[in-house]
Image (cartoon, rainbow, N blue to C red):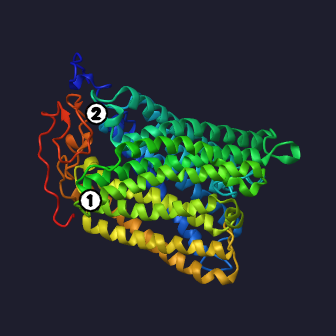
């Protein structure tokens, strides 16, 4: 495509020319919006696979004596399920997916800082997922998503494939973190100071260093595990002078910050939805923004609370217990700010808003159980039980996944130019919330009663509760299937949305839907904070961006 001489603020100063042809435009794309959608679609494909594995687990656990799978197959299934949901669904969805699509638009940029690197980052992701699932063909890993040695030093080559797959995902997310950090620092629109950035941008800005630093520790741990398995280098084998605890320290130095990699962008999603549908400014903007930075910093100081049962010296356990409780404070600041935003607002109960409200309840429950587990005596009692399974699922399903659904219903009109069906959306919401709580609340009881986690067979006294959990898990699965039907149907048949159907004020809603390749005809100037709904839209230079007017909101949407 021929490119004219650059004009300041014009289309021609886009960082790269618009590609021609299907392959260059939609497959090997360097457009951040297409890459974001690629991440989202690929992550949802892996969610279907990981969800099917979860249902196999629940079918197995309906009978105390198992019988649906052998114990070895069960170990493979729950290991790949956990690995899928963490590294192939939530992490790429919230960073690569929503981050790529929304973040550059919200700062008034035409793309990320390094578009080609962005494309490379994505294309490390699908091969990694395929490699992980190919491990079933040769003996998948069996030590759980944490892959603790010495168990992970044994078994077939599937664990080595697991190492390579997760390493590839880690490299891709690290490159994305570098890209986002440079983009946030160097490519904000004129006038967009740090205290005028949307809160989703703040969330991605706080997440980027987490990704860059923490993933390096995981990469080193994975490389060491791979070398020990393939070449006999004794990093973790105690019979050869290695230390299994070395893996735990390096793994959790990544994996506890990874919890915040998976949840901080979701905090940003919720912080965009609440002011939009409460029709009032976000309460405590600066506190929400700065608390994201606090969480990112404190996230590196709490990893060893996962290791209280490992023989860690008592004088080391105490500071980790205290810091784990302290990190609840900036999270609590966000929750109270969101509730204050809702207080007195003219709340519009779209499906996105319903999921956002449910997020507060379910994530807070997961956070409260996390405070319990931060207490050393309680953790020593509950560590190997289903209480841990309940906690992590409330954080990742009740937190991250619920927030992902909220974000999809919120930004779907911007991605496609059409609304998702609100009636199907409400059915999805209620089935999902009922299924989620019916599945995971009883797991707390099972844990306190003493049922161990990661077992294919269990004491018959726990069978009835497990059967109830499995039935509710099928309800949650039905909700997710309804979501996919809604998303696919609405691409062609959803009501047209116009450029700003929610009457939101951040920059992505001030341009057409879906956004044009170049994003902005002229880079706008930011004049004020984007959440003051009682003031004029705080941007200059957007006068000729639109060829449409805001579409009316569908009947029954609120």
Q: Position of residue 271 (x, y in %)?
A: 35, 50
Q: Secondary structure at mark 1?
A: loop
**Nearest the eye: 268 or 94:** 268
Question: Can residue 49 be seen by looking at this rendering?
Answer: no
Depth check: give the residue in front, 139 or 516: 516
The residue where tag 1 is placed is: 420
How many neighbours does mark 2 have within 10 angstroms: few (below 14), some (14-19), or many (20 or more)? Answer: many
- Per the model, the C-alpha gap separating discs 1 and 2 is 26 Å
Instruction: State the residue lying farthest toward the top.
Output: 5
Label 1 environment density (alpha carbons within 10 Å; few <14, some 14–19, many ≥20):
many
Which quarter of the image is occupied by the C terminus?
A: bottom left
Q: Looking at the figure, which quarter contains the N terminus?
A: top left
Residue 131 visible from this viewpoint: yes
Q: Which residue is mark 2?
A: 108
Q: Position of residue 259 (x, y in %)?
A: 54, 50
Q: Residue at image x 39%, y 72%?
A: 431
Q: Quadrant of residue 115?
A: top left
Q: Residue placed at 74% from the left, 39% from the top? A: 227
x and y percent of residue 197 in the render? Answer: 33, 37
Residue 289 lies left or right of residue 448; in this view the side is left
């Amino acid at each position: 495509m021929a490119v004219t001489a650059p004009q300041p603020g014009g289309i021609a100063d886009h960082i790269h020319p618009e590609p021609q042809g299907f392959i260059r435009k939609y497959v090997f794309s360097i457009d951040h919006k297409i890459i974001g959608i690629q991440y989202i679609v690929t992550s949802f494909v892996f969610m279907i696979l990981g969800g099917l594995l979860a249902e196999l687990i629940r079918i197995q656990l309906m009978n105390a004596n198992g019988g649906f799978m052998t114990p070895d197959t069960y170990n493979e299934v729950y290991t790949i399920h956990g690995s899928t949901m963490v590294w192939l669904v939530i992490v790429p969805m919230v960073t690569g997916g929503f981050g790529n699509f929304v973040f550059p638009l919200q700062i008034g940029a035409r793309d990320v800082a390094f578009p080609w690197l962005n494309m490379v980052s994505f294309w490390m992701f699908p091969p990694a997922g395929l490699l992980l699932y190919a491990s079933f063909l040769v003996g998948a890993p069996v030590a759980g998503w944490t892959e603790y040695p010495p168990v992970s030093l044994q078994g077939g080559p599937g664990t080595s494939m697991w190492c390579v797959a997760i390493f590839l995902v880690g490299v891709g997310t690290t490159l994305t973190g570098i890209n986002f950090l440079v983009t946030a620092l160097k490519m904000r629109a004129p006038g967009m100071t740090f205290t005028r950035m949307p809160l989703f941008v703040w969330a991605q800005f706080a997440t980027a260093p987490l990704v860059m630093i923490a993933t390096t520790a995981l990469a080193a741990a994975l490389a060491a595990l791979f070398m020990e398995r393939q070449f006999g280098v004794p990093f973790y084998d105690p019979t050869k002078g290695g230390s299994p605890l070395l893996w735990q320290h390096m793994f959790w130095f990544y994996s506890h910050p990874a919890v915040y990699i998976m949840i901080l962008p979701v905090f940003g999603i919720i912080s965009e939805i609440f002011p939009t549908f409460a029709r009032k400014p976000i309460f405590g903007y600066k506190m929400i923004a700065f608390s994201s930075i606090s969480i990112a910093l404190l996230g590196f100081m709490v990893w060893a609370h996962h290791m209280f049962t490992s023989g860690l010296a008592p004088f080391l356990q105490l500071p980790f217990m205290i810091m784990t409780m302290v990190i609840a404070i900036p999270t609590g600041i966000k929750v109270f700010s969101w509730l204050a935003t809702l207080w007195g607002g003219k709340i519009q109960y779209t499906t996105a808003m319903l999921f956002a409200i449910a997020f507060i309840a379910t994530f807070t429950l997961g956070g409260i159980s996390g405070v319990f587990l931060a207490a050393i005596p309680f953790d020593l009692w509950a560590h190997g039980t289903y209480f841990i399974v309940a906690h992590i699922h409330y954080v990742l399903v009740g937190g991250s996944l619920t927030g992902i659904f909220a974000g999809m219903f919120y930004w779907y009109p911007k991605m496609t130019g059409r609304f998702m069906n609100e009636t199907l959306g409400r059915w999805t919401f209620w089935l999902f919330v009922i299924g989620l709580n019916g599945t995971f609340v009883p797991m707390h009881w099972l844990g306190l009663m003493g049922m161990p986690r990661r077992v294919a067979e269990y004491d018959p006294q726990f069978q009835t509760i497990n059967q109830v959990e499995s039935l509710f898990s099928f309800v949650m699965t039905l909700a997710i299937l309804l979501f996919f039907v809604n998303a696919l149907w609405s691409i062609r048949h959803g009501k047209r949305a116009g450029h700003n159907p929610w009457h939101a004020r951040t920059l992505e809603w001030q341009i057409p839907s879906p956004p044009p390749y170049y994003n902005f005809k002229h880079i706008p100037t930011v004049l004020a904070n984007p959440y003051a709904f009682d003031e004029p839209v705080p941007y200059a230079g957007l006068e000729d961006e639109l060829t449409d007017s805001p579409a009316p909101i569908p009947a029954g949407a609120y």
